[in-house]
Image (cartoon, rainbow, N blue to C red):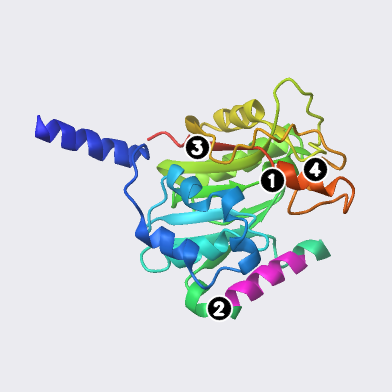
Amino acid sequence: MKKSIALLLCSLLAAGSVYAEDAALRAAIAGPQRTPANAARDPARHPYETLTFFGIRPNQTVVELTPDGGWYTEILAPYLSANGHYIGAGSNPASASEAARNSAARFAQKLQADPASYGKATIGIFEPPTTYQFAPAGSADLVLTFRNVHNWVKLGDPALKALFASVYTSLKPGGVFGVVEHRLPEDRPQDATASTGYVHESYVIKLAREAGFKLAGTAEINANPKDNADHKGGVWALPPGYANRDEDRALYAAIGESDRMTLKFVKPQ
C-alpha cells in the first residue's frame, strides 16, 4: 500500500499536479537582480504560481519566446544557472528590421551587464514568420511565452501553424509549452489581427492541438474578473501601460492588469 502511494505521488509530481515548495525559485524571485519596477508587478503576474503550474525544475532546458525587456529572464536565468539552461529566444540581431535589431541589442546588453546572474544564459533567434533558430530539435524541456500570442495572430493561420510547429519540434517528448495570454471572452468577436490585444482561449488551444500538443491543464492563476476586455485602446489602456494617459486612469487602475489565460500543453511521449 505504501509503495502504491509513493508511486502515485511520484507520478503526480512528474505530471506537474503536485508541487513541493521550490526554495530556489522563491530565492530567484526575491533576488537582488530583479528590477524594482518588475518586482512590483509580481502580485499581478504571479511568477511563482505560474512557473510551478508549468512544472519548472532547476535542471531543465527552458526557452522563453520573445523575452523582450527580460521580465521573466530576471527570474528564469538565475534559477536555471546552476543545473539547467535558459535560452532567451528573441529578435534576430541581423534582422532587416531596425526595431528588431535594437530589441536584440537591448536584450544582449541586459545579459552582458550582469554576468553573475545571466552569464550562463544563451540567446536564440525567434523572429516570426521567418526564423526559428532557438533550440535543437527535441532538446527543450519547457518552452514559455508570456502575452505574445496576440502579436502573432496578425501573421495569419499558415504562419501561426509553422510557429507552433517550431515550438513542438524543439521540445522533448513529454516537454511542456506554457502560454499566458490576454483573454477575450468567447462571446465577443475576435478580429483577424487581435487588434485589442485579447485572444480567445479556444483559439490558442485549437492552434496548439493542431500542432500535435495535448492540453494538460488550464489555470486561473492570472485571471482578473474585473477586466471585461472592452477598453478604448485595447488591453494597453490597463496598467502598467495606461495608453490613454490620464483619461479614466483611476478606472483602469481599479481594474488592474488584464484577465489572462494560463495554458499548459504537453508534447506526447
- Pointer 3 with pointer 4, Cβ within 8 A: no
The amino acid beneath tag 4 is Leu
Identify the secondary structure beneath mark 2: loop
Q: How many other residues sit within 10 Å of disc 4, few (<14), some (14-19) or many (≥20)?
A: few
- State yes or no: discs 4 and 1 in contact (Cβ < 8 Å): no
Label 1 vs label 3: CA separation?
Answer: 21 Å
Percent position (x, y) of residue 36?
62, 68
- Position of residue 180 in the picture relative to residue 50 (left or right): right
User: Where in the figure is residue 14, as x and y percent of width and height?
Assistant: 32, 41
Against 162, residue 62 (above or below) is: below
Residue 96 in sight from this viewpoint? no
Q: Which residues are magenta?
A: 101-112
Q: Name which residue lies at 83% across and 37% down.
A: 231
Q: Could you tell whether 195 is left or right of 223 in the image?
A: right
Q: CA distance from mark 2 to mark 4?
A: 38 Å
| Residue 200 percent coordinates (x, y) | 69, 29
Find out whether residue 241 is within the magenta segment: no
Would you name the residue on which mark 4 appears? 251
Amino acid residing under circle 3: Lys
Q: CA distance from mark 2 to mark 3?
A: 31 Å
Say whether disc 2 or disc 4 marks the residue closer to the N-terminus: 2
